[in-house]
């Protein structure tokens, strides 16, 4: 599969931006992220591959938009779970029950919730659990949450690009 992706990128370098967008979106959505390898591995690999074809600004914008939309999708999945039957997503609640309870407890404190949303972007499982739980809780001031989803996505993508540049520099 990796060979197929590399051949596709070599024949048409514009495809790499779509792969980066889809992976960054998928790593921020709860259903997709449970089946993919860790985000740092997949996105760093794609960023290193795309170094010849894309500049860092284009890559940064692509990852930021993809992960931001992934957080929004996950937030609305949480809202839909709240308004419907939670048994449809039972595998998530069984696997992450303790973490979901801790996130609910922390998100109730409005002062800490913005910090938690920002920091959750940098922790693998919390990247999609925090938006899911905030959607389930029907948190007020949703526009401020969207701002923090966007802000944390942009900082996260900056650090991914910085890491890929360091890997390229030292290799």
Image (cartoon, rainbow, N blue to C red):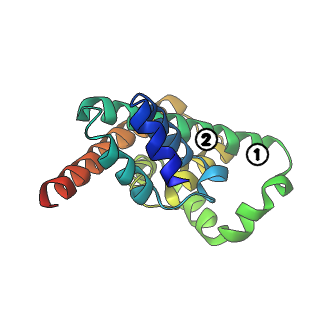
Query: Residue shown at 63%/72% (left/top)?
Result: 98
Separation of residues labelled 1 and 2 (CA atoms): 11 Å
The residue that disc 2 covers is: 75
The residue that disc 1 covers is: 82
- Mark 1 or 2 closer to N-term? 2
Left or right: where does residue 136 sit relative to residue 128? right
Closer to the camera in the image, 141 or 125: 125
- With respect to residue 87, does 94 lie above or below? below
SS assignment at label 2? helix
- Residue 19 in sight: yes
SS assignment at label 1? helix
Query: Residue shown at 30%/50% (left/top)?
Result: 160
In the rendered image, residue 116, in percent from the top left (x then y), is placed at 43, 54
In the rendered image, residue 60, in percent from the top left (x then y), is placed at 31, 36
Closer to the camera in the image, 68 or 47: 47
Closer to the camera in the image, 55 or 136: 55
Residue 50 quadrant: top left
Closer to the camera in the image, 54 or 119: 54
In the rendered image, residue 11, in percent from the top left (x then y), is placed at 43, 33
Q: Classify 10 Å Cα crowding around label 1: few (below 14), some (14-19), many (20 and above).
A: some
Mark carried by residue 37:
none
Residue 167 quadrant: bottom left
Query: Residue shown at 53%/47% (left/top)?
Result: 4
Left or right: where does residue 76 sit relative to residue 103? right
In the rendered image, residue 57, in percent from the top left (x then y), is placed at 25, 30
- With respect to residue 151, does 130 lie above or below? below
């Amino acid at each position: 599969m990796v060979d197929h992706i590399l051949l596709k990128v070599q024949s048409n370098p514009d495809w790499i931006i779509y792969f980066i967008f889809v992976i960054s979106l998928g790593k921020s959505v709860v259903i997709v992220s449970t089946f993919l390898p860790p985000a740092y591995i997949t996105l760093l690999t794609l960023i290193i591959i795309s170094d010849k074809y894309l500049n860092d600004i284009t890559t940064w914008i692509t990852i930021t938009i993809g992960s931001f939309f992934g957080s929004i999708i996950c937030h609305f999945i949480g809202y839909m779970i709240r308004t419907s039957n939670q048994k449809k997503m039972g595998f998530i609640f069984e696997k992450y029950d303790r973490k979901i309870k801790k996130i609910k407890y922390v998100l109730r404190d409005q002062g800490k919730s913005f910090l938690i949303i920002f920091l959750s972007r940098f922790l693998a499982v919390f990247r999609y659990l925090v938006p899911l739980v905030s959607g389930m809780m029907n948190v007020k001031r949703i526009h401020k949450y969207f701002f923090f989803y966007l802000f944390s996505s942009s900082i996260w993508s900056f650090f991914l690009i910085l890491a890929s540049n360091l890997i390229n520099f030292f290799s």
